[in-house]
Each structure stands twice: as C-alpha cells, then as structure tokens.
C-alpha cells in the first residue's frame, strides 16, 4: 500500500546570502524511495558549514532554494524497498548533504547509523559530522602516530573536543587553542596538555606550550595570521590539515564583503619550493567531498566507531522554533561543545 505524503516543518532558504532569508514553513514529504528511510527528526546539530552555506560563502551550497543542515538524530518511521538493516522504530543518527533543518526527511540508508546505547538524540546529533571531521583530519590526512604533538584550534568547539579525545587515545600530546580565557577550564576538564588563548602573542604562547617538543600536526580551522604562525611552528615532516576558515565568519545576517575581500587578498600563501626545503605539508578537505563517496565515508565511520572516546559534549540546546537564535549564538564564537536544536 502506497504511503501518503506527510506534512513537515522546515527552515528553507529562497537563496543563499543572508540569515534573514531563512524561513520557517511547512511542505509535503513523500514516502521514502528505494534504499531510503524516512526519519522523524528529534535533534539537529549546527555546524560552521551551515552558516557559510546560509551566507553564500560555501562552494558546495546548492543553487536556488535549499534547506541547510548536515546532521541530525531521530527515529525511523518508514523504510523504502531494499532496506534490510533498519526498521521502523529504530533510533538513529545521520548525516546529509544539506536538508537537516526539518522535522522529517527521507535519506539514503547508507548515511544512517544506529544511535549508540545510552546516547540521547541530542548527543547523536553532536557526533557524526564533528567526529568524521576530526577523525579524517587526524588519521586519514594527518597520519597521527603515538608520541606526536598535535595543535588543535577551536579546541572547545564540537570538532575540537572530539579531536582532542581521538588524539589522546592515540597516545599524542595535545595543545588546544581557544578564543577566550573562559574556555580554558573546559580544555583542562578534557585533559588537553596545554591551552592557549589566541591573541596577538599566540606565536610566543605556542612556543612556550611546546616546551621543546616538535609540533607534528596542526588541525587548522581559523585562517589568517593563526594559520601562518601555526605553520611556522611546525617541525620538519609536520602536517597542517585545514578544514575551515573561521576568520571569514561574521555575526551579522549578511557577510561583510569589504572585510572578506581584504581577508581574501591577504590570505596565507605558501611557496612550494620553501615547503620542500622545510619538509612541511599542508592538506585541506571539505567533508561534503567525503559525503559524495559513500563507501569511503562508511569505512571512515566504521574505523571511527572502533575508538571509544565517550559521548560528545552538548554545550547548548535550543527549541526548533528558536533555530535562528541558535545560529546567531553559534556565530558569536562564545559557544562551547556542540550547539543542538531539539525538535
């Protein structure tokens, strides 16, 4: 018997460019297609990629109207033909290439994972995108080894907290950077070896935190001067893995295009000849690319879940109706842990 369409609530952008374009509305959702499951969303995780897409600064942003959002947790309410590993009533967490700011969605079952026993929906919505980013950066690109020293930027954020845990589990020494002194207590609670506040004396503080250790790996998501000084501090054979550019973020509804133009023109530039002489490497990735390679994504997820780093840290929760306010807080940089919207 054919399932009737349901009515769902969504936050949709008519086009990218401004947070003020984000509209709360209702629309129909048909049944799941072959290989898909239909999910009743219980929690939505916010990510920097969401905000960059909303403001039109993310190259992977869909053209025209789209629904932001990359990760969620919820309950399977229907299965399409060919789905055998999931059933109605299963609690799951998942990732999607946009479309998560909703109460219900249809998604390819390959991008869905069972919610771990004892985890809340909020914790499930705080794990996959952040965990994949941290794990892929550290191990697939960063070649993290026991005894390495790792610098994790934005160490009090969702990715940073998990990256610190993964690195410590692998036997690495971690140094975390944060934007304010209020976040240093969290780094101590998470067992970070050293904590640094990113101010004008960052390079001096980093040298002191290293205490003579070689800097083997940097997880870089800030850009600008912090990128340059982190790269300069790396030892020969060091790797810097870039996965974000928070310096380009803004708190207003629209980007400050004059500031963005200045930052773009003054962005870090590297000389390959000098890189060879210093034996340093820079790698960069976009998680959307990994999403488009389902088999590689699945293998990374399987590898990631072999490492027990505990439950993710949910720092802030908002109601679905207050989702725009959650985004505005997220953009301030004052948050710690994951920002989650409860449906």
Image: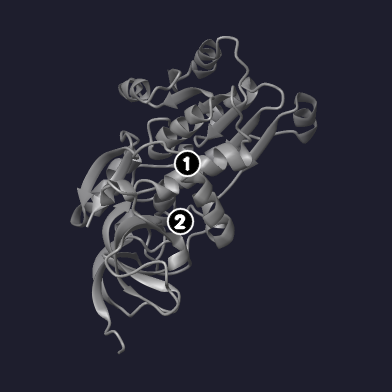
- Marks 1/2: CA distance? 12 Å
Give SS at disc 1.
helix
Q: Is residue 301 visible?
A: yes
x and y, in percent, of residue 70 in the image: 41, 56
Q: In this view, does 129 lie above or below 206?
A: below
In the picture, the quarter occupied by the C terminus is bottom left
Instruction: Identify which residue, 285 or 94, lies in the foreground.
Output: 94
User: Badge 2 is on which residue?
Assistant: 56
Of the numbered discs 1 and 2, the one sitting upstream in the chain is 2
Q: Residue at 61% x, 33% y: name it.
A: 240
Q: Is residue 84 above or below residue 153?
A: below
In the picture, the quarter occupied by the N terminus is bottom left
Most distant residue in the bottom direction: 1
Q: Residue at 19% x, 57% y: name it.
A: 321
Q: Is residue 255 visible?
A: no
Question: In the figure, residue 24 lies in which quadrant?
Answer: bottom left
x and y, in percent, of residue 111 in the image: 45, 61
User: Badge 1 is on which residue?
Assistant: 248
Question: In the figure, residue 294 lies in which quadrant?
Answer: bottom right
Left or right, residue 174 beside residue 125: right
């Amino acid at each position: 018997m054919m399932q009737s369409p349901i009515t769902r609530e969504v936050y949709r952008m008519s086009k990218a460019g401004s947070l003020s374009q984000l509209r709360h509305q209702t629309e129909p959702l048909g049944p799941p297609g072959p290989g898909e499951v239909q999910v009743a969303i219980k929690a939505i995780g916010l990510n920097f990629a969401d905000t960059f897409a909303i403001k039109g600064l993310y190259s992977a942003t869909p053209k025209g109207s789209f629904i932001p959002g990359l990760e969620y947790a919820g309950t399977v309410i229907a299965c399409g033909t060919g789905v055998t590993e999931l059933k109605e009533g299963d609690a799951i967490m998942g990732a999607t290439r946009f479309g998560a700011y909703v109460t219900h969605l249809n998604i390819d079952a390959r991008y869905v994972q069972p919610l771990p026993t004892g985890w809340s929906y909020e914790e499930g919505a705080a794990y996959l995108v952040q965990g994949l980013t941290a794990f892929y950066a550290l191990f697939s690109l960063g070649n993290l080894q026991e005894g390495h020293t790792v610098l994790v930027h934005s160490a009090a954020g969702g990715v940073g907290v998990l990256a610190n845990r993964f690195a410590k589990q692998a036997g690495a020494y971690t140094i975390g950077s944060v934007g304010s002194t209020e976040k240093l207590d969290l780094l101590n609670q998470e067992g970070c070896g050293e904590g640094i506040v990113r101010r004008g004396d960052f390079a001096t503080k980093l040298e002191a935190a290293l205490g003579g250790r070689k800097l083997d790996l940097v997880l870089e998501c800030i850009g600008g001067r912090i990128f340059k000084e982190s790269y300069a501090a790396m030892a020969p054979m060091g790797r810097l893995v870039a996965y974000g550019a928070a310096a380009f973020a803004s708190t207003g509804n629209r980007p400050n295009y004059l500031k963005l133009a200045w930052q773009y023109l003054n962005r870090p530039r590297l000389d390959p000849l000098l890189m060879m002489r210093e034996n340093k490497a820079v790698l960069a990735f976009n998680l959307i690319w990994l999403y488009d390679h389902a088999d590689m994504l699945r293998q990374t997820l399987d590898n990631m879940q072999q490492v027990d780093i505990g439950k993710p840290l949910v720092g802030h929760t908002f109601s679905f109706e207050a989702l725009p306010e959650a985004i505005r807080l997220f953009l301030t940089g004052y948050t710690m842990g994951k920002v989650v919207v409860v449906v």
